[in-house]
Image (tube, rainbow, N blue to C red):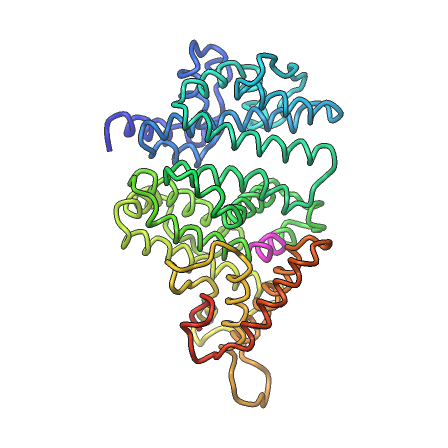
């Protein structure tokens, strides 16, 4: 790791939780100085991940993040009747397709994040210069992402989209951009869009939990919100783990791999903390673990296994909490977690969530006891059935109610998998480790 990257990382760690220094940000004398000062209050843990990247990727990622925050400002803080038009105008101005900036915002930030967004909107010209200074391929890659994200934001402002569609179209598209950036493969944008959407949904769920969005989920209190969010995590997590497994062999840069690992570790730690499940790594070890994961495939696999195991425990605790408690062992502790996310054959995983869900549902079902039921099922088997139900119904809920062809395809996948030979695991879609 060179001196520039070490300096950026050290600065980020010192300012990870610091409030934005608004006078310093306003006084920044160049776009580059503004970017250096604003990245941490604008991105927090994502800013640390960006600091790990090589210099060329770091410059592009920083410009893209700040541009997205400008769009956030116009989406959230502009008068609603004008907001969609302002978002699209901001996209055109940032990408250089128009020289007319969006109208200034007349709002006051209620939170630090809104204060940062307002400041970046005020200095949109500087953000535009950061984008225009990128190499042509970087400008085009970031520009495509901004067009797609801005279009979904505008659609949502004009007519509210389903939460899942918004998450996949905005945060999922940003994740897809990040994948193409770290792999240096623009073709990945057409290949892994559905799996990237899953990680976008995870990020949105984490944001909603952090912001206490009770009304969005019909929750009466934080405990109900946590349960609702964690149960909605099941299907996106399957796609997220599949994407992380694929990224491993397609990312040459150690810094880029470490950046992806750091975001996986820290996001998982936040979600696990919400239900009292252990994080994959203690806080002081997370950066070290990410750097190790970036150094080799074996360390990457270790990191992914630990993250998966932590999510398994978090899901188990959520299921047990929704049932009013769980069986415990002789020592009074909960039994072992059910392994839902242990992927097999990750190099041949399909870049589509449907087969992943169907495979996991039947792997769970086939792991149930074959013997006749003579009493109540053991606690772990009850959890197994409940998780299979959540996955199956969640797969249906993801579909557009008007998309008859998609429903037929999903039904066919369930039917074909149900008829497969359960003893021949090579023919079954990747699933769980029973």
Residue at horizontal 72 percent and vertical 39 percent from the top: 160
**Does residue 329 belong to the magenta stretch?**
no
Query: Which image quarter holds the N terminus?
Result: top left
Residue at horizontal 33 percent and vertical 42 percent from the top: 258
The quadrant holding residue 187 is: top left
- Judge by depth and name the residue closer to the eye, 397 or 263: 397
Query: Which image quarter holds the C terminus?
Result: bottom left
Is residue 61 shown above or below 25? below
- Judge by depth and name the residue closer to the eye, 255 or 26: 255
Can you give x and y, in whole percent of width and height, for residue 109 in the image?
Answer: 62, 23
**Does residue 232 belong to the magenta stretch?**
yes
Q: Is residue 154 left or right of residue 50?
A: right
Is residue 121 shown above or below 256? above
Q: Is residue 269 left or right of residue 319?
A: left
Q: Is residue 363 left or right of residue 226?
A: left
- Judge by depth and name the residue closer to the eye, 192 or 254: 192
Can you give x and y, in whole percent of width and height, for residue 352 in the image?
Answer: 51, 55
The magenta span reads 226-233
Residue at horizontal 66 percent and vertical 25 percent from the top: 77
């Amino acid at each position: 790791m060179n001196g520039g990257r070490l300096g950026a990382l050290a600065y980020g760690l010192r300012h990870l939780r610091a409030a934005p220094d608004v006078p310093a940000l306003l006084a920044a004398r160049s776009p580059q100085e503004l970017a250096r000062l604003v990245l941490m209050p604008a991105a927090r843990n994502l800013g640390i991940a960006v600091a790990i990247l090589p210099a060329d990727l770091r410059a592009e990622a920083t410009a893209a993040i700040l541009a997205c925050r400008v769009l956030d400002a116009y989406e959230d803080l502009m008068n609603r009747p004008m907001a969609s038009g302002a978002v699209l105008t901001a996209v055109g101005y940032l990408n250089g397709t128009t020289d007319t900036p969006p109208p200034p915002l007349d709002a006051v930030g209620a939170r630090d994040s809104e204060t940062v967004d307002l400041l970046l909107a005020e200095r949109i010209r500087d953000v535009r210069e950061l984008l225009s200074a990128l190499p042509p391929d970087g400008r085009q890659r970031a520009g495509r992402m901004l067009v797609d994200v801005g279009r979904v934001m505008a659609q949502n402002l004009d007519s509210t989209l389903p939460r899942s569609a918004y998450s996949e179209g905005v945060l999922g598209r940003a994740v897809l951009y990040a994948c193409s950036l770290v792999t240096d493969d623009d073709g990945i944008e057409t290949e892994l869009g559905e799996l990237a959407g899953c990680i976008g949904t995870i990020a949105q769920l984490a944001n909603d939990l952090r912001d206490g969005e009770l009304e969005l989920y019909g929750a009466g209190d934080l405990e109900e919100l946590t349960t609702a969010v964690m149960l909605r995590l099941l299907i996106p997590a399957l796609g997220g783990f599949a994407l992380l497994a694929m990224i491993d062999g397609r990312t040459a840069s150690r810094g880029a791999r470490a950046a992806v690992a750091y975001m996986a570790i820290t996001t998982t730690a936040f979600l696990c903390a919400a239900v009292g499940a252990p994080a994959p790594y203690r806080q002081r070890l997370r950066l070290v673990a990410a750097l190790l994961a970036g150094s080799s495939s074996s360390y990457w696999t270790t990191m992914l296994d630990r993250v998966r195991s932590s999510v398994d425990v978090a899901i188990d605790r959520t299921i047990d909490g929704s049932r009013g408690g769980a069986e415990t062992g002789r020592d009074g502790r909960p039994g072992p977690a059910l392994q839902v996310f242990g992927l097999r054959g990750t190099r041949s995983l399909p870049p589509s969530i449907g087969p992943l869900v169907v495979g996991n549902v039947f792997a769970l079902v086939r792991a149930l006891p074959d013997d006749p039921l003579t009493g109540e099922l053991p606690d772990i088997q009850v959890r197994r059935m409940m998780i299979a139900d959540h996955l199956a119904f969640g797969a249906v809920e993801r579909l557009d109610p008007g998309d008859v062809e998609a429903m037929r395809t999903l039904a066919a996948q369930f039917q074909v998998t149900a008829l497969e030979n359960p003893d021949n695991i090579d023919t079954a879609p990747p699933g769980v480790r029973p």
